[in-house]
Amino acid sequence: MPAWSSAARPTRTSRAVTPDASGPFRVGLLGQGTVGAAFGKLLEERADAVEQEVGRRPEVSGVLTRSRGDFRDILERSDLIVELIGGTDPALEYVLEAMRSGRHVVTANKQLLSQHGEELYATAYEHQVQLRFEAAVAGVVPAIRVMGETLAAAHIERVHGIVNGTTNFILTAMEETGASYEEALAEAQRLGYAEADPTEDVSGTDAAAKMAILARLAFGAPVRLDQVPHEGIEHLTAEDIEYAKDLGLSLKLIGTAERIGAGLAVHVHPAFLYGGHPLASVRGSFNAVTIESPAITEITLSGPGAGGSQTASAVLGDVVSAMIPPPTLPPPAIELPLVTDVESAFYLYLEVADRPGVLAQVAEVLGLQGVSIKSVVQKGLGEDARLVMVVHPVLGSKFRAAVDLISRLDFLRSTPRVIRVIEEVFE
Ligand SMILES: NC(=O)c1ccc[n+]([C@@H]2O[C@H](COP(=O)([O-])OP(=O)(O)OC[C@H]3O[C@@H](n4cnc5c(N)ncnc54)[C@H](OP(=O)(O)O)[C@@H]3O)[C@@H](O)[C@H]2O)c1
């Protein structure tokens, strides 16, 4: 992890519980649902291999669910706590109490970290214990480890992520089969990729929580979930995807965290990508994270973003890391202003009356706001026409102002649709 600045170091008051090195390494398991049950099974299967590797045998010392187990009793009998309950209540109190009592904590809980990260990091440092959370972002894809350890000395400029498998599954199905959003969502639910209530995924909230966590790691600045503007995929249509293919674009739900001048922008939006972008080829329920830095150009990590056994594997990896000293500590927070008006290229979809001069008028309104067209496709449909275009990068506020003016023109047949375009390609 990046080095701590000494000014920001809180006072240490205690150290991690030193386990009896001759006995087993005792893991208290909070939650035994999809991930917790898979973790318990995997730990049992891999215990011999871990013992050979690390010299200690991990074993589950107690399990807490809603109907079974007592937290304090489990804590007393554990060297490390694995939190797989989810949500913030009672997970936050359990995790804080575990760290205050000198236990390392491994969690897969994005809600906890994106809403209470600073309190958790400070508590881990104060009590000199490890707080590991690889599985909280992009499942088994080792984005946290690579960013916090391998790239600890790199100056990261930008992180783009497909960090929600449900939405990527839906968008891939729409792109590959021409299905509507509703049809693709129903298929995702049938196959178990989407919950019965998919709101958190399709609204972009889940991705926003993960981007808040990644932004903290990449830039050292505290970012909370409620500071991450996000837009979901519910309003996207098969037509957007179909017409954009003519422009060489494919549609993804992209989380972005990037330096803008002396500040930082973190947001989640549907975005079109050109074929040369490493995230353009990420299909189905897979997740991927692209990290850009001048020293490395870019690194892309991809793999399954969820699933019991996959997530359990990332959790066990964290447990094994925590068994090996010295502890890895989170970096201190640095303050960076959050920038919300960011430059981007945009896709614009207009349904207009099919008559001469329409494109010229649209171009004129865009031009007056400093927006220039990069490419355009026009399709006639009886009396109406569709104008689908991509504009060069421009401040979001300027583009929105131009679209607002366009939406008032008398030849418009429906509300304009706008989607961001990420222009980078890496070849
Ligand atoms: N599922 C995935 O693919 C995935 C992927 C990445 C990260 N995660 C994260 O992993 C964590 C666990 O997810 P999951 O899908 O395994 O959840 P889950 O299937 O809903 O399991 C939750 C477990 O926590 C227990 N629990 C709930 N409230 C409790 C309480 N108040 N006290 C004690 N135990 C309580 C439940 O007990 P009962 O058994 O009694 O109901 C259950 O065993 C979440 O933070 C999630 O975001 C999940």
Image: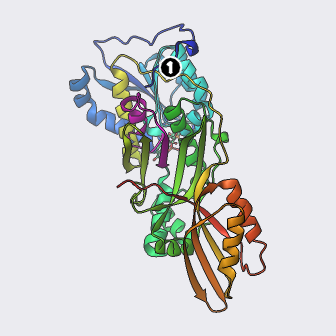
For the N terminus, which image quadrant?
top left
In depth, the one of 346 and 372 nearer the eye is: 372
Residue 426 magenta-drawn? no
Q: Could you tell me if residue 97 is visible in this image?
A: no
**Viewed as shown, does residue 166 lie left or right of 27?**
right
Which secondary structure lies at badge 1?
A: helix
Give the answer, above or below, for where 46 lies relative to 424.
above
Residue depicted at 61% across the width and 77% down the height: 387
> Residue 394 is drawn in which quadrant?
bottom right
Q: Residues within 10 Å of mark 1 (few under 14, many from 20)?
A: few
Q: Residue furthest bottom?
A: 382
User: Which region is colored magenta?
Assistant: 137-162
Residue 337, position in %: x, y? 65, 34
> Residue 79 is drawn in which quadrant?
top left
Residue 315, position in %: x, y? 40, 35
According to the picture, the residue beneath numbered tag 1 turns out to be 73
Q: Residue furthest top?
A: 13
> Residue 155 is drawn in which quadrant?
top left
In depth, the one of 25 and 279 nearer the eye is: 279
At label 1, the amino acid type is Asp
Give the answer, above or below, for where 245 lies relative to 382.
above
In depth, the one of 151 and 145 nearer the eye is: 151
Residue 257, position in %: x, y? 54, 43
